[in-house]
Amino acid sequence: MLDWFSEISTPLLILGGMALAFGALLGFAAVRFKVEGDPLVEQVDALLPQTQCGQCGYPGCRPYAEAIVHGEKINKCPPGGQSTINALANLLDVEPMPLDAEHGEEKETKMVAFIREAECIGCTKCIQACPVDAIVGAAKYMHTVISDECTGCDLCVEPCPVDCIEMVPLETPLQGWHPEKPPEGIELIASDRRQLSKRSAA
Amino acid sequence: MSLMRATSPHARAGDSTAKVMLQVAAATLPGVLALVIYFGIGVLINIALCSITALACEAAIVKLRQRPVAFYLKDCSAFVTALLLGIALPPYCPWWLPVIGASTAIVLAKHLYGGMGYNPFNPAMVGYVVLLISFPVDMTRWVGPAEIINGAPGIDEALSLVFGFGGYNVDGFTRATPLDIVRLNESVLLSQLYATEPVLDQGTVAGLGWEAANFGFLIGGLFLLFRRVITWHAPVAMLGTLTLMSLLFYDSGSSLSEGSPMLHLFSGATMLGAFFIITDPVSGATSNKGRLTFGAGVGLLVYIIRAWGSYPDAVAFAVLLMNFAAPTIDNYTLPRTYGHKSARRATDLEER
Amino acid sequence: MSSEQQQLRRESALERRAAREAQLIASDQKRQKARALRPNDFPGGVYPPENKHQSTGEPIGSIPLAEQLVVPLLQHTGSTAIPLVKLGETVLKGQKIAEADGLISCSLHAPTSGKVVAIEPAAVPHPSGLPADCITIDADGEDRWCELQPCEDFRRFTPVELLEKIRDCGISGMGGAGFPTAVKLDPHGGVEIDTLIINGTECEPYITADDMLMRERAEEIIAGVEIISYILDEPERVLIGIEDNKPEAIAAMRAAAEGTRFDIVVFPTKYPSGGEKQLIQILTGREVPNKGLPANVGIVCQNVGTARAVYRAVRFGEPLISRVTTVVGKALERQRNIEVPIGTPIKHILKAHGAHRGLMQKVIIGGPMMGYTIDDTSAPVIKTTNCLLVPTVEELPPAPPAQACIRCGFCAEACPASLLPQQLYWYARADDHEKLQAYNLFDCIECGCCSYVCPSSIPLVQYYRAAKGDIRTAEQEKEKADRARERFEFRKLRMERAEKEKQAKREARRKAAELARRQREESGGAEAEAAQKEADLVAAALARVKAKQASPEQQLARAQRSLTSAEGRVERLQQKLEAAEEKQRDQLAAQLKAAELKLQEARQKLAEAERQAETAAEAGRESTPGQDDPQARAQSAIEKAKAAAAARAAMSPAEKLAGEIDALKARVEKARARLEKACSAGDANVEAFEKALQNLQQKLEAKLREQKQAGEEKQ
């Protein structure tokens, strides 16, 4: 009787003790070495282009980031384009999808707003519309765009009563220029090449 | 007049991949010559069979992948793979061995991984190991040196052996290799063994024929070093480690000795492996420090498998095992860049 | 032996011993110095064919002045200079025509006398081939100097004054990147500058500009080195490094440096020993720290050409308006070095040297290892143009197609920075920015050794340049995005605060009203009823506001209601108008107009509401089936997106145009309405509105014309 008990009890004790010890160790490690990760919203927000243009249907990038975390689709950001979608898909571990055309098209060149200052009547409507305070001016005085701060969101064009705001392509200065990657040559595998030709045709 | 746009540098050294490959091929000549002198023309038949199969496979696959065939065959890499496999295979083995080996090397080990430059494993060694595991009997039958078996097989004999007609049996020509002899010995002192076994007795240090072939490959390797096609790091590390290990377990030539350093250095595929196999840049380590580690690992594994494993020679296994380790070695052996206090790891930024 | 003699002997023995000791010390010092001066080696490097003999056969020559000189406002990294001259202004040779903007910028001077005919973008020597702002001067042929301020003895000035002088003369590095010299000579590395290095290496094949300069102007160079050394507070060592393939230059420099404390160090030829970092390693064994400057290890490095420019600037007051340039290549009839004014168009130089049009396949600015090609030969010579290389196809054949990388490691052997080019190539192709930085991409000096030796002829350096640019751009974009985010958040905060303040005010007013009401109630119940009414009104307004935020269906209904009422009003007004008498007619007409406008607005609103209601309904419909199945939802989204993309792709340009026209029409309509309203209200901005309307109409007309044209073309 006792034999049987001791035979069972020793391994039980050992295993139980080990379980307890490792459990305590793991618990301790979890508390002691806790990684303070960015909350998911922050991470998503960091990937969005911060144009604050509202083309996604949310009033700014952060609200859209919050919506994405709560299950909104990731393909509603035209300024970010496919690269942003891919980055989001990578972060959230979902399949990347094409840009939702309902919200606009991905623009090839970066644009900034430009106010034809002679025509400006100083109505401040564009100032109110600008999500990043990139337009300076006062009532009855001419306004102008701080092009370094302009995100190219388009939001100021519509409210202008005299239609003196236009979007102009952002010039690349000589200093900012850099060569492009050499074209992929002979090394392409057949399927890549088909994709490439499709892309260049589009 | 339209001027051409091009990025610098506008001058080039004029080396080409094909030239590099052909130099490697040329460097095998002394070793192959020694093999022919001591073991007959079997090795040439192997090389021919392997080359034809490899080039045909390469052409077919490149065609399948819809790329210019001539452009890819021109780089001669398939030929070098075939050449090394052909040298490694036992002479006078049946014709389907080289064919299977070469096609495995090209299709499986090279092109399924993305082709030239993308293969994680040495194609020739993959081909060899696939054969060794699948057909162990055929793969371990080495003919003896010509002087011992009273003349190597002639052309007609060789062809009939390879293509299996005329009723010849290869068993009539095969002998145990020096490594086999020493590994299986458990009863006599090494000096007695050297006196009794004809292969060892007629050779100087590591068996008749074998030492000459290894010496040939050593010469070829030195040529490659001289031509700066390879660096000294991997071969020196491998040979050094092998010497060190065999010294440690030499046991002053007792009956349980695993063989002298000279035996290990100049027998089996040691020199071929050291200068032609582990210097394959695609599947090896990248930096010089990494090559040292890589070579040392191969040397260690070669000795371990030779001494205590169940295969007589081990270069192929050792190389493949170290191919597995190459990315990890690369991660830890980045050179110190100009202006940096110390070398860093490739995954530095991700781990931070 | 007298004591005197003994004394003498003792003294002479002492003297001898002292002399011997002095000799020993001297020889020890010499040995130490020799040890210190023994050049080190750097890892890697290549030995391309030197090709220096072609252009050293003749002394430095000159060519006739070009008719027009083009001076780019930016000739180096840094900020663009600000023009000081106006169009049509006459300038004298050496007159300052543009002022440096900020620290890392260089002022510019007229290379000859003449008239400013253009300040506008023009072709410049830059790898991008993009135009940049330039000042174009029509030479009058007189080459008249402006007044200069020579100076016999530079030691009368303080180093700060000399630096000012150098800055004023627009001197920038003449070897490589063209960094402003005054900035380099005023180091803030936190370490005492103990070594001045003068770079006479010129390791690039073909280029002999510095070589010829050292042969012919060695005195000027040494005089410049004296000035630089004085500015740097006489560093302990002044080393002039020259490769051993220029024996004539070494002899000339040795002769010129006779009697100075400057050491000429000769070391074996190897590319890229002329790179600043590599030269420092060769001469001192020190390494410039990563992300640091030579000044961080107590070193300042200057090119021989720069030293000469410094001398001429200080001694004669001459600004940097000309330089020695090598003109070389088999496509030329005459290959030599020339001293040429900055701004001379390259085609003018090529013409003067008999460039063969058929043989000329590319024009390289700089050497074959690091130079870049230009496709517009009207670009001018700038301060950094040390070589014009015009090779034939046989001389420098174009690169064969790239093959796969076999990781042979030749590139790693050749890399002077001990990088692993093969790995960098791998990650550059995959755009793996993190890994690229882990493999120290930014320590690459783009010398081209890796591409030079690559047996697969992969354009490795181009991959690195592109990757560096991509990483920099990504960083800038990230910075900009962060700023935008900050500004957006701040704005939101501000709006919230303003809203809160408004609410607080409203609350205060409400409380005041309450108080007043209560007081009134207390004073008499008669007004209670009125107060009640007021409260009702507020409630009604609140309800209205709420309704505004109501569902699309409700909005639709409301829009319909307002539409009918507006229609009714218009009808009534029309009837009234017909029935009205003459004098009331004008007034009524205006009222009618306003009503019509309202009607239009109501129609628009209705349309919008309908659309919204529709989309809401659609969304409702769509969201029901796929709710529990994300897979299906994603699938449907993909389908939708695909369909949309297909529709977009299928949309012909004509349709797109039509859409644009519709949008423009709507905007014209709106602008017209706004104008009318402004007119009737007597707004001060009527003119602006009129102009806007005109603008829009013009745009619309242009689009309509385009459409018409397209239509015609189709037919």
Image (tube, helix red, strand yellow):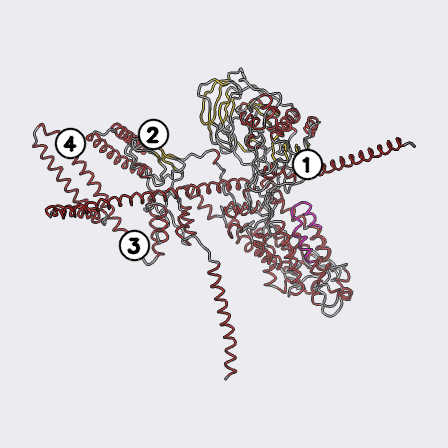
In x, y percent, where is residue C145?
54, 17
In x, y percent, where is residue C105?
51, 30
The amino acid marked with disc number 2 is Glu
Q: Earlier in the sequence, mark 3 or mark 4?
A: 4
Q: What main secondary structure does the magenta stretch of the protein show?
A: helix
Whether discs 3 and 4 lie on one chain: the answer is: yes
Classify mark 4: residues with Cα within 10 Å, few (<14), some (14-19) or many (20+).
Answer: few
Residue A117 - label: 2
Foreground mark, 1 or 3? 1
Classify mark 1: residues with Cα within 10 Å, few (<14), some (14-19) or many (20+).
Answer: few
Quarter of image, res C364: top right
Foreground mark, 2 or 1? 2
In x, y percent, where is residue C695?
29, 29
Whether discs 2 and 1 lie on one chain: the answer is: no
Q: In terms of secondary structure, where does tag 1 sit?
A: loop
- Which residue is tagged 4? C590
The amino acid marked with disc number 3 is Ser
**Distance CA(mark 1)–CA(mark 3):** 76 Å
Image: magenta residue range = B219-242
Whether discs 2 and 3 lie on one chain: the answer is: no
* In the image, farthest residue toward the right: C1
